[in-house]
Image (tube, rainbow, N blue to C red):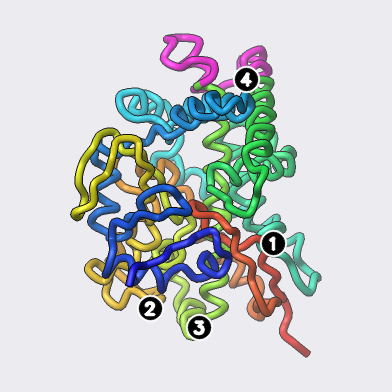
């Protein structure tokens, strides 16, 4: 019997793991008509594809060209702007763009931020004191990483509410959100406004001669040696702002869902907080905030007996690879002591997430302080609504009770 994988159905995205299990076993390179592309689910294949030049990261340029042919100028313009993002580039341009950002995300740079991250966490948690409940996403899991990445970039953190509105609309395109029929219009408008915002930030910081923030280093790369175009400068500020909070928000949210739904694991973590680092890795593996990455075939080739044609879309399912029994013992079990844990949630190869260590540190501090401050925290919903997105995995809202029931 052939397998039908339809990620546009809410019930599939609410729990896609049973069908991933079947796809890995029976059809690991699966043609998916709703996606008009290939779905790859085995760990070895997903890892290989992220370091193989036959799989191109440049899916924005073909998108822009197609929208231009379809006489959709706003969507075409959005595609051309996205094509300046480091994540949508192959070497050699990808290498140049990535190198300009590395200094801000070295282990030493991230460790230097640990105190500031803790302050932001504690400030957000203090604002919840005395309240019986919160929405963890809106009240905590979003503003934390958004404030941190704003600090790294050098943009005002009082603008984070604006960032969220723009990011939510942009995520409908980048995250492949099936439930939003006007996602191209919303995404194009949001990206245009974000680009305009950063053009203004760049002009202001350049005029003042500001130094020390990541955006200043990018300005210098543009002004001093011409290694960065104006559109690349602004575009990579946008992608850092967007990627710098989107997946970390979901890491924190997904982690709380997993822990609160598994009292034995939560009890173990409360008894031994030093397990937090392995717990975060297991959260990343078990409910990866980056659910999938897309690549385009750069040439014709064969993969596990399937004929991939040049230009074919290929969805590398990180979440499916992370539960491959050939690489993880008892992979459907959530175990905060799992070690080693070589998940693919931050990608692999040249496109390995530049902010991986930052996300880990934010997740560890956030979950540790949250559990310390609210010992009676509990889910306050009978049903959680997962975002209908193929690329980004998280709940839209996470209602939590902060006090024990009377």
Quadrant in the picture for the C terminus: bottom right
Circle 4 SS class: helix
- Disc 2 or 1, which lies upstream in sequence? 1
Q: Is residue 342 left or right of residue 75?
A: left
Mark 3 surroundings within 10 Å by alpha-carbon count, few (fewer than 14), some (14 through 19), many (20 or more):
few
- Give the labeled residue for mark 3: 267
296 in the magenta segment: no
Q: Residue at x 28, y 39 (%)?
A: 309
Q: Residue at x 46, y 65 (%)?
A: 287
Cα gap from disc 1 to disc 4, whole angstroms:
32 Å
- Disc 2 or 3, which lies upstream in sequence? 3
128 up-or-down from 45: above or below: below
Cα gap from disc 3 to disc 1, whole angstroms:
21 Å
- Give the labeled residue for mark 1: 125
Quadrant for residue 226, please give it.
top left
- Give the labeled residue for mark 4: 202
- Give the image location of residue 379, x and y in percent: 65, 77
- Chief secondary structure of the magenta span? helix
- Residue closer to the observer: 83 or 282: 83
The mark found on residue 173 in the picture is none
- Give the labeled residue for mark 2: 333
């Amino acid at each position: 019997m052939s397998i039908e994988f339809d990620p546009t159905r809410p019930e599939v995205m609410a729990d896609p793991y049973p069908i991933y299990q079947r796809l890995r076993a029976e059809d690991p390179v699966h043609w998916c008509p709703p996606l008009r592309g290939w779905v790859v689910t085995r760990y070895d294949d997903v890892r290989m594809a992220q370091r193989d030049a036959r799989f191109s990261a440049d899916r924005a340029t073909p998108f822009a060209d197609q929208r231009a042919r379809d006489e959709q100028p706003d969507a075409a313009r959005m595609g051309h702007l996205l094509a300046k993002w480091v994540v949508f580039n192959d070497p050699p341009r990808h290498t140049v763009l990535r190198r300009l950002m590395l200094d801000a995300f070295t282990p030493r740079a991230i460790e230097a931020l640990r105190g500031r991250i803790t302050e932001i966490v504690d400030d957000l948690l203090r604002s919840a004191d005395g309240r019986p409940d919160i929405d963890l996403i809106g009240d905590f899991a979003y503003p934390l990483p958004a404030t941190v990445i704003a600090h790294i970039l050098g943009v005002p953190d009082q603008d984070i509410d604006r960032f969220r509105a723009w990011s939510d609309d942009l995520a409908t395109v980048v995250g492949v959100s099936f439930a939003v029929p006007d996602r191209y219009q919303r995404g194009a408008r949001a990206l245009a406004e974000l680009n305009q915002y950063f053009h203004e930030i760049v002009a202001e910081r350049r005029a003042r001669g500001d130094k020390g923030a990541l955006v200043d280093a990018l300005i210098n790369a543009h002004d001093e040696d011409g290694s960065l175009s104006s559109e690349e400068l602004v575009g990579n500020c946008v992608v850092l702002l967007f990627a710098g909070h989107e997946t970390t928000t979901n890491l924190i949210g997904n982690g709380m869902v997993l822990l609160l739904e598994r009292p034995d694991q939560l009890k173990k973590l409360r008894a031994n907080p030093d397990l937090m680092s392995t717990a975060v890795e297991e959260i990343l593996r078990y409910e990866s905030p980056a659910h999938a990455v897309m690549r385009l075939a750069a040439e014709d080739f064969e993969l596990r007996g399937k004929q991939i044609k040049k230009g074919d879309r290929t969805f590398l399912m990180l979440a499916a690879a992370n539960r491959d029994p050939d690489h993880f013992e008892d992979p459907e079990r959530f175990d905060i002591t799992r070690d080693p844990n070589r998940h693919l949630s931050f990608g692999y190869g040249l496109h390995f997430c530049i902010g991986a260590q930052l996300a880990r540190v934010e997740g560890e501090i956030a979950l540790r302080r949250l559990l310390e401050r609210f010992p009676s925290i509990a889910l306050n919903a009978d049903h959680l609504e997962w975002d209908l997105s193929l690329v980004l995995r998280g709940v839209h809202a996470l209602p939590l009770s902060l006090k024990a029931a009377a």
